[in-house]
Image (tube, rainbow, N blue to C red):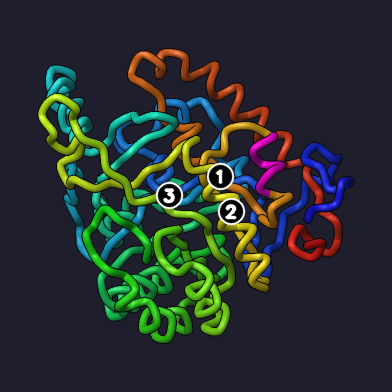
């Protein structure tokens, strides 16, 4: 376990944090999807309104929405030119892919994204002030190789923190266990950037982590969303267009903590970026105690009910407090996992 003196809030020197081959500005990053591509072409669409009041460049890294080889509508849309009179239609679309549930959110966007080429051309150059983790997703080893090659060609080594391989999403109706080893064998060695593997609590995450370590993956993200279902109690119809979706938010924090702890108990020594229900400094502290090296803010922070977004500036103040506390965090030289 993390030693008692390894507390969030211990004064630090403000320097970068190194997790193996990955260099972060500090130990607090943002989770994939919630902040789109780190910047919006329309000023707000694709990003949580709360993020508009937070200095994203101050985070350890900002993780992009998962990007695929070709643009992908998923179960939503890639369109961004919504006029004000079209807002009701946009909100109806959101209702088919994102719903608030007890203790969190369930979503099924299905890797809706503009594609890797458009991201590298139109978005990445506008986020050079941020430390970036580019999330990549594909349905074959060949697609991951293509994605890695495109990032290599456009981004010099060292200019981003890492690429994250999303091989654990439930919203695209695909069994990633059938391609994981090929992805690790073929795509990881080609990357000029450190590779993070994102783990699902619904797959054999200990075995997947061990596979990742053997393949030269630099770090792990734990966890992705939990496969879930909600039905309309009056009609029995699924709340989401895809039927099943990914559960995130406060409800999955105990699961995330369990996975991080079990990975450490199983002897996994790769750096761990923990995510799942993190909202407060105490949440961060729990994950550090469980064995995480860094923590990530997701839907528990960035999503709210529509009326709740009116308080976005005040919610952003809370995010800043968490960020400032984690920026001062300095673990024991042995690292969080070393004391377990």
At x 65%, y 52%, the residue is 294
* Count of labels in the image: 3
Position of the N terminus, as image quadrant, is bottom right
Per the model, the C-alpha gap separating discs 2 and 1 is: 6 Å
- Identify the residue under disc 1: 254
Residue range of the region highlighted in magenta in the rendering:
282-287
Per the model, the C-alpha gap separating discs 3 and 2 is: 21 Å
Q: Position of residue 81 (x, y in %)?
A: 18, 33
Label 3, residues with CA under 10 Å away: few <14, some 14-19, many ≥20: many
Q: Is residue 42 left or right of residue 238?
A: right
Q: Position of residue 266 (x, y in %)?
A: 64, 71
* Frontmost residue, 217 versus 97: 97
The residue most toward the right is: 5
Depth-wise, is mark 3 or mark 1 nearer the camera? 1
**Tag 3 and tag 1, C-beta contact below 8 Å:** no
Secondary element at tag 1: helix
Label 2, residues with CA under 10 Å away: few <14, some 14-19, many ≥20: some
**Residue 284 within the magenta-colored segment of the rendering:** yes
Per the model, the C-alpha gap separating discs 3 and 1 is: 20 Å
Q: Position of residue 175 (x, y in %)?
A: 27, 69
* Mark nearer the N terminus (3 vs 2): 3
**Tag 2 and tag 1, C-beta contact below 8 Å:** yes
Q: Is residue 133 left or right of residue 289?
A: left
Label 1, residues with CA under 10 Å away: few <14, some 14-19, many ≥20: few
- Identify the residue under disc 2: 258
Location of residue 26 with respect to 313 vertically, above or below: below
- Identify the residue under disc 3: 32
């Amino acid at each position: 376990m993390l030693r008692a003196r390894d507390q969030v809030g211990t004064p630090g020197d403000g320097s970068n944090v190194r997790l193996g081959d990955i260099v972060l500005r500090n130990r607090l990053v943002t989770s994939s999807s919630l902040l789109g591509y780190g910047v919006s072409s329309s000023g707000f669409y694709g990003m949580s309104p709360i993020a508009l009041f937070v200095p994203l460049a101050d985070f350890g890294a900002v993780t992009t929405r998962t990007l695929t080889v070709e643009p992908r509508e998923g179960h939503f849309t890639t369109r961004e030119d919504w006029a004000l009179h079209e807002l009701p239609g946009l909100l109806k679309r959101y209702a088919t892919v994102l719903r608030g549930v007890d203790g969190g959110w369930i979503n099924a966007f299905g890797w809706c994204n503009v594609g890797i080429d458009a991201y590298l051309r139109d978005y990445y150059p506008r986020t050079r002030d941020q430390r970036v983790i580019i999330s990549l997703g594909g349905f074959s080893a060949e697609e991951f190789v293509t994605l890695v090659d495109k990032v290599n060609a456009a981004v010099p080594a060292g200019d981003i923190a890492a690429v994250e391989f999303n091989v654990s999403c439930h919203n695209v109706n695909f069994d990633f266990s059938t391609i994981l080893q090929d992805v690790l064998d073929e795509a990881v060695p080609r990357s000029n950037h450190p590779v993070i593997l994102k783990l699902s609590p619904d797959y054999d995450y200990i075995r997947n982590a061990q596979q990742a370590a053997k393949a030269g993956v630099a770090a792990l993200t734990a966890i992705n969303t939990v496969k879930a279902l909600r039905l309309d109690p009056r009609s029995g119809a699924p709340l989401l267009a895809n039927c099943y979706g990914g559960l995130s938010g406060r409800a999955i924090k105990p699961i995330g903590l369990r996975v991080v702890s079990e990975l450490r108990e199983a002897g996994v020594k790769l750096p761990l970026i923990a995510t799942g229900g993190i909202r407060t400094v105490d949440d961060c502290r729990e994950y550090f105690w469980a064995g995480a090296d860094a923590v990530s803010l997701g839907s528990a922070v960035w999503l709210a009910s529509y009326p709740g977004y009116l308080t976005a500036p005040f919610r952003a103040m809370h995010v800043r407090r968490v960020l400032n506390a984690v920026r001062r965090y300095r673990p024991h030289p042995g690292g969080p996992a070393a004391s377990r």
